[in-house]
Image (cartoon, coloured by chain):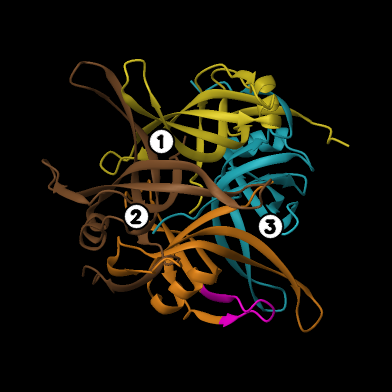
Chain colours: A brown, B yellow, C cyan, D orange
Amino acid sequence: MFDTNIVVIGNVLTPPEWRRTAGSNTLVANFRVASTARRLDRETGRWVDGNHLRVRVNCWRRLAEGVASSVAVGDPVVVAGRLYTRDWTDSEGNLRTTYEMEAVSVGHDLSRGRARFFRTRAAA
Amino acid sequence: MFDTNIVVIGNVLTPPEWRRTAGSNTLVANFRVASTARRLDRETGRWVDGNHLRVRVNCWRRLAEGVASSVAVGDPVVVAGRLYTRDWTDSEGNLRTTYEMEAVSVGHDLSRGRARFFRTRAAA
Amino acid sequence: MFDTNIVVIGNVLTPPEWRRTAGSNTLVANFRVASTARRLDRETGRWVDGNHLRVRVNCWRRLAEGVASSVAVGDPVVVAGRLYTRDWTDSEGNLRTTYEMEAVSVGHDLSRGRARFFRTRAAA
Amino acid sequence: MFDTNIVVIGNVLTPPEWRRTAGSNTLVANFRVASTARRLDRETGRWVDGNHLRVRVNCWRRLAEGVASSVAVGDPVVVAGRLYTRDWTDSEGNLRTTYEMEAVSVGHDLSRGRARFFRTRAAA
């Protein structure tokens, strides 16, 4: 079977946090993103709010660097990645399920602003 | 902003249930689907299990009919649709969040079997 | 960079053809699919035809078997896979470009019919 | 049926060109994007080039503004949108088919650089 591909177009809800993993010292950053779909109401002919989505986005290595240095709360973004379920046990012993995504690409949404981009020099 | 498009390739976890909505008498069916990604391990060169996903799938109108009459637990399926967050309050007053998808298309995955298909006669 | 993921919901245009590759004797099937988007016209409030798409779909191994034994012209299908460009030279020496997709999953669209599915017995 | 959703992660091949449509004076920008998938070779254990894709991207209204003012040749980008086929007749009367995408969002890929973003002030 295959990865569950997903694209979220929305706004950054929380400031990106980053850390290095204990074992491999790999950089990882995460933030939450929110999206509200818009749909055309057939009866009124007006655009109205549709479904909402909020999800945590995990970014690794170079993407973590780019996100940590470039993304702030409220920024409009496009996030492409894979959705998965994480199962855990809370402090009272209850089984809980969280949905998260691992991003393969994050960018500022140019339909809602302008950007100056500084490309990373490729490693030799 | 836009709908959050998602495609899940996995197996049906629960028997599809269906009902009609109170107000508009619209047919709606739902089931749960599970997917496990496979990834090539760089060190061993073998395919191993990657991320897991379980999610509830809601189907409306004609898709609900097709799903209710064709899909059973364990069937391998491909599901295309939109992901969203549903917020609710549990019996103890705690705010809870669930992720669900509204399917636009569901089909049996022909990489894992064969199918005989009977097309619905289009309404006059 | 990453594969270009794509999902097509449409109808089968051509009967699936299949063959075995010369070197590895791998089964491959292909067919063409057509899709027409529908969009809500803001001025009339009616649904009208939007963009069209026609594309060749290549299926490998078990998916080729399932498709070759189950899919016929006119069938409504959902196809998930990856889009790519193929460059070639025609008989007059002109450089030509074709777009094709490699499917990871194909299924009959249950919003437009019912199906009986026979699962392949997993290899021991 | 539904729009054919697609996400391309790649590099800008041509400088964005923009114009206003004759009738409605709507701003539209276009550029070409190229993407090369990477895949893990099972025999050597190394990452090698996989499929290629080149496609023209059309952007409308605010997205056209953002793209025209922010995107240059060579920039790494993530593009989410819809794929469609455009049929036309060349100067010798031959029927030709082109594939294009209409973008709903374009962003600089933060896995390959850093960005400063300036949000458009929302219209009153």
Front position among marks 2 and 1: 1
D107 to the left or right of A50 = left
Give how far apart the Cα atoms at labels 2 and 3 are.
48 Å
> What label does residue C42 carry, if any?
3
Give how far apart the Cα atoms at labels 2 and 1 are.
19 Å
Residue B37 vs A18, above or below: the answer is: above
Verify whether residue C17 appears in magenta. Answer: no
Amino acid type, callout 2: Trp
Give how far apart the Cα atoms at labels 3 and 1 are.
41 Å
What's the chain of the residue with tag 1?
A: B
Q: What stretch is highlighted in magenta?
A: D19-31
Residue A33, given in percent of the width and then of the height, sits at 34, 48
**For the residues tagged 3 and 1, is the chain the same?**
no
**For mark 1, does the 10 Å Cα neighbourhood hold few (<14), some (14 to 19), or many (20 or more) residues?**
some
C75, D52: nearer the viewer = C75
Residue B105, given in percent of the width and then of the height, sits at 62, 37
Q: What element carries label 2?
A: strand
**For mark 3, does the 10 Å Cα neighbourhood hold few (<14), some (14 to 19), or many (20 or more) residues?**
some
A25 to the left or right of D50 = left
Residue C117, given in percent of the width and then of the height, sits at 66, 23
Q: In which quarter of the image is residue C90?
A: bottom right
Residue C59 vs B87, above or below: the answer is: below
What residue sits right under mark 2 in the picture?
A: D47
What's the chain of the residue with tag 2?
A: D
Verify whether residue D24 appears in magenta. Answer: yes
What residue sits right under mark 1 in the picture?
A: B37
